[in-house]
Amino acid sequence: MDKEKLISDAEEYVRELLGNNSGGHDLSHSMRVYKNAMMIAEREPGADLTVVALASILHDVDDHKLFDHENNENARAFLSGKGVSGELTEEIVGVIDSVSFSKNRGKKPGTLEGQIVQDADRLDAMGAIGIARTFAYGGEHGRSIEESIKHFYDKLLLLKDELNTDTAKGLATKRHGFLEAYIAEIKEEIGE
């Protein structure tokens, strides 16, 4: 199995599936999660890098907010079509299943790979990019600015304390501070 080709094909698959998404769950998000995950994996040795790479790139191809099916249908179809073994496929989809904040609130993944990919995704929901994604998603779903700000309290400001790896916790400090500064500023501008 040519790992680089498989990663490139996964990127193309995400582009095909999520290319038109304007709500923050697009190819650029998936590739930031991939980049974050690989960087964390380098600093947190012991992870299977193939599992981390593929799970991070494919983590949104079956997201319940985007698709109405179960059992990681899209990820499984891609992996099967590329000749990935059943065992490796199960490892990858197991990691994918551990990523979603709403479905895994307060749960620590049982594998290092799951912890890394979950952290990588959560880092992309923090800081400046997290703010941009919140308002992109809110706009796509008809949310007001005030409704989108509520999302900061429901999720974004909670992420720092739910990270798994020391690397992600270190990266989250600055991003969390930026979120807090943004909330303080917008509350002042709104007049709260």
Image (cartoon, grey):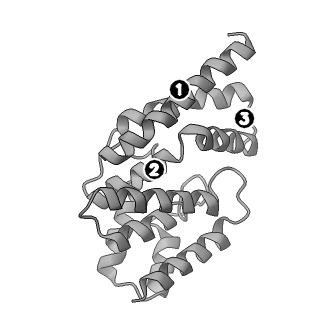
Numbered disc 1: secondary structure: helix
The residue indicated by pointer 1 is 153
- For label 1, the crowd category at 10 Å Cα-Cα, with few meaning under 14, some 14 to 19 and many 20 or more, is few
- Counting every numbered tag in the picture gives 3
Location of mark 3 (residue): 143
Q: Quadrant of the N terminus?
A: bottom left
Secondary element type, mark 2: loop
* Closer-to-camera residue (28/39): 39
Question: Is residue 155 at all visible to an observer of this figure?
Answer: no
Density class for disc 2 (Cα within 10 Å; few <14, some 14-19, many ≥20) is some
Residue corresponding to mark 2: 100
Side (left or right) of 179 relative to 144: left
Mark 3 secondary-structure assignment: loop
Write the residue at 25% across / 54% down. 110
Which amino acid lies under the numbered mark 2 shown in the image of this protein? Ser
Q: Earlier in the sequence, mark 3 or mark 1?
A: 3
Q: On the image, which quarter does residue 150 sit in?
A: top right
Left/right of residue 188 with respect to residue 38 in the rendered view: right
- Give coordinates of residue 148: x percent, y percent: 66, 32
Residue 15 coordinates in the image, percent (x, y):
65, 70
Q: Are marks 2 and 1 in contact (CB under 8 Å)?
A: no
Q: CA distance from mark 2 to mark 3?
A: 21 Å
Q: The residue under label 1 is which amino acid type?
A: Tyr
The CA span between labels 3 and 1 is 15 Å
Query: The residue under label 3 is which amino acid type?
Result: Arg
Can residue 97 be seen here? Answer: yes
Which label's residue is closer to the chain start, 2 or 1? Answer: 2
**Displayed quadrant of residue 160:** top left
Mark 2 or mark 3: which comes first in sequence?
2
* Residue 157 versus residue 14 in the image, above or below: above
